[in-house]
Amino acid sequence: MISLPGIETLVRTFGPFLIPATLFVLGAIGYLFLWLLTRNRRETYAADE
């Protein structure tokens, strides 16, 4: 498999840390999306009253 030497070094160095870090980042993005969605819906309901 052909890959960049820098990426191969990073995976070899931080390999065990990459999966939890990736899951954390995806979870944080999902949480931010849900927070923005509920904030927008709250503002919509407040405008209806």
Image: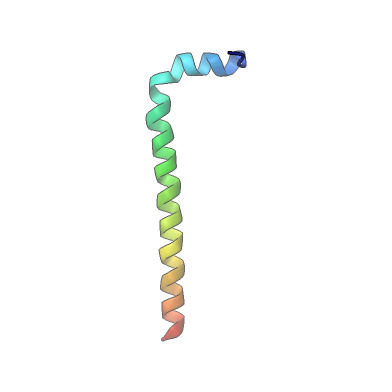
What x and y, as percent, mark residue 34?
41, 57
Q: Is residue 42 above or below residue 47?
A: above
- Residue at 43 percent of width and 26 percent of height: 18
Q: Which residue is found at the position 44% from the left and 39% from the top?
A: 25
30 is higher (above) or lower (below) than 11: below
On the image, which quarter does residue 21 sit in?
A: top left
Q: How many marks?
A: 0
In which quadrant will I find the C terminus? bottom left
The residue at the point 41 percent across, 78 percent down is 45
Which quadrant of the figure has residue 5? top right
Residue most extreme to the front: 1
Q: Position of residue 6 (x, y in %)?
A: 59, 16
Q: Position of residue 36 (x, y in %)?
A: 46, 60
Q: How is the image coloured?
A: rainbow
Which quadrant would the N terminus be assigned to in this image?
top right
Of all residues, the one furthest to the bottom in this rendering is 49
- Compared across the picture, whether 4 is left or right of 17 comes to right
Q: Position of residue 31 (x, y in %)?
A: 40, 51
